[in-house]
């Protein structure tokens, strides 16, 4: 166990921590994953962030494969092993090819299954690397996703960057039996 990873004892949560834990486990996640368990140390942050995360993961205008391309790109950018391993499985289940996922992991240009996957990846990479996107890429993204889809994509990138920073700063351990893939 990492010296930095010290979530609250699930058996001894405060009333406020328990309320947030119940909201997390009662939602679509069904469990409290590593970074959210860290956030429980600050229940108001945990509550607000987990609601944003529920939207970013399950309710945006983007189709699940596009959401997962964005999340995997963010996880790769931050070298966030926990997030990568979690969303690699989800991405495969959403229909992203193993070759595309491996290309993202290897920082290589994938042969995209659809053009909008390439747009989501390029937008996410450019936003993370330069803190903005070019006018040309913005127009391409709006044409592919709609303006509301671009707003959702920026929200996904922001939320999963926060998740990845939490994982990295608090050294959230990998799931039992998992091996690192990004180093």
Image (cartoon, rainbow, N blue to C red):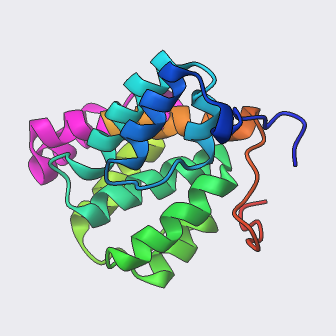
Report the side of 172 relative to 134 (left or right): right
Q: Which residues are magenta?
A: 127-154
Q: Is residue 17 left or right of residue 135?
A: right
Residue 57 coordinates in the image, percent (x, y): 32, 49
* Residue 107 percent coordinates (x, y): 60, 62
Residue 12 quadrant: top right
Callout count: 0
Quadrant, the C terminus: bottom right
| Left or right, 135 with reference to 161 | left
Q: Which residue appears at 44% of the width and 52% of the height?
A: 71
Query: Looking at the image, which residue is at 43% across and 34% down?
Result: 159
Q: Residue 52's spot in the image, x, y percent?
A: 33, 32
Task: Report if residue 96 is visible in the image.
Answer: no
Query: Is residue 76 shown above or below 22?
Result: below
Asked if residue 144 lies in the magenta stretch, the reply is: yes
Check residue 33 for magenta coloring.
Answer: no
Do we see residue 93 in this rendering? yes
Question: Which SS type dominates the magenta stretch?
Answer: helix
Which residue: 49% across, 73% down? 89
Instruction: Name the image quarter holding residue 24.
Output: top left
């Amino acid at each position: 166990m990492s010296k930095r990873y010290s979530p609250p004892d699930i058996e001894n949560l405060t009333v406020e921590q328990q309320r947030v834990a119940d909201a997390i486990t009662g939602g679509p996640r069904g469990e409290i994953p590593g970074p959210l368990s860290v956030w429980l140390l600050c229940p108001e942050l945990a509550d607000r962030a987990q609601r944003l995360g529920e939207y970013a993961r399950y309710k945006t205008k983007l189709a699940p494969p596009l959401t997962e391309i964005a999340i995997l790109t963010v996880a790769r950018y931050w070298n966030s092993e926990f997030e990568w391993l979690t969303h690699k499985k989800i991405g495969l289940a959403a229909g992203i090819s193993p070759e595309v996922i491996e290309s993202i992991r290897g920082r290589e240009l994938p042969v995209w299954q659809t053009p909008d996957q390439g747009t989501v990846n390029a937008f996410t990479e450019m936003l993370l690397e330069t803190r903005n996107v070019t006018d040309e890429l913005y127009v391409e993204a709006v044409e592919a996703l709609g303006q509301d889809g671009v707003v959702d994509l920026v929200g996904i990138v922001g939320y999963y960057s926060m998740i990845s920073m939490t994982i990295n700063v608090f050294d959230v351990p990998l799931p039992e039996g998992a091996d690192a893939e990004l180093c």
